[in-house]
Image (spheres, rainbow, N blue to C red):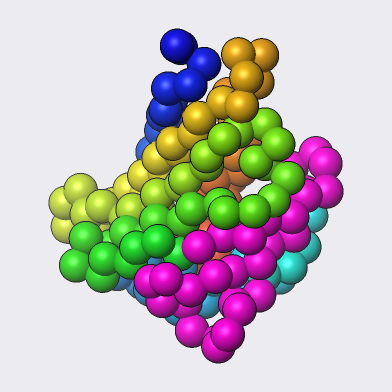
């Protein structure tokens, strides 16, 4: 059935900041996104510890038009590949989607240039569920905002 298959949305954003610095911010300073995007990210907590690592659980409160919460497992961190995979295991988004995963990856295009790629994999709970465009739009907004910040700091 078409409504039970995994769908995928992708977004890619060119960045001017150093790719290692950009990935390092996400890897080590994810909690600072709350201060940087307060209108969208309301809170971020790591369950059992203070370090983002593969297997850890994180709690997010966010607003992309509606206040929502999510419990997200950091499924994989690949420092060599500069990627982090997030898997929503509880939360409001799972009322619309049976599964919801997001992969963040920083790619070095050539010296002095890079890009950030976001891949959302989701399975709709029913045929009428919309594609999660607002999540892609926010990923793009956040990527550009973080790039501008890192280029200045």
* Residue at the image position 49 percent from the left and 34 percent from the top: 122
Depth order, front residue of 8/41: 8
Q: Is residue 124 left or right of residue 83?
A: right
Depth order, front residue of 38/84: 84
Q: Is residue 95 left or right of residue 74?
A: right
Query: Residue 32, can we see it?
Result: no
From this view, report whether residue 2 is shown above or below residue 100: above
Instruction: Find residue 8 and report its horizontal and vertical position in percent.
Output: 41, 29
Instruction: Find residue 23 and report its horizontal and vertical position in percent.
Output: 37, 66
Q: How many marks?
A: 0
* Residue at the image position 46 percent from the left and 56 percent from the top: 86
Magenta stretch encompasses residue 64: yes
* Residue at the image position 73 percent from the left and 45 percent from the top: 92
Magenta stretch encompasses residue 57: yes
Q: Quadrant of residue 117?
A: top left
Report the magenta residues as a range.
45-73
Q: Quadrant of residue 61?
A: bottom right
Q: Which quadrant: the N terminus? A: top left
Instruction: Find residue 87 and report its horizontal and vertical position in percent.
Output: 49, 53
Q: Is residue 130 left or right of residue 120?
A: right
Residue placed farthest to the front in the image? 1
Depth order, front residue of 132/117: 132
* Residue at the image position 20 percent from the left and 48 percent from the top: 109
Instruction: Find residue 129 and report its horizontal and vertical position in percent.
Output: 65, 21
Query: Residue 70, can we see it?
Result: yes
């Amino acid at each position: 059935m078409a409504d039970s298959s995994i769908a995928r949305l992708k977004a890619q954003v060119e960045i001017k900041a150093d790719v290692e610095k950009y990935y390092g911010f996400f890897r080590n300073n994810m909690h600072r996104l709350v201060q940087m995007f307060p209108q969208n990210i309301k809170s971020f907590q790591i369950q059992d510890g203070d370090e983002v690592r593969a297997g850890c659980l994180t709690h997010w409160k966010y607003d992309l038009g509606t206040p929502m919460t999510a419990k997200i497992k950091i499924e994989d961190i690949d420092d060599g590949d500069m990627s982090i995979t997030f898997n929503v295991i509880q939360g409001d988004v799972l009322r619309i989607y049976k599964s919801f995963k997001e992969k963040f990856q920083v790619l070095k295009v050539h010296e002095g240039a890079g890009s950030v790629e976001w891949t959302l994999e989701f399975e709709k709970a029913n045929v009428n569920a919309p594609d999660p465009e607002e999540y892609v739009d926010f990923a793009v907004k956040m990527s550009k905002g973080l790039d501008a910040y890192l280029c200045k700091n």
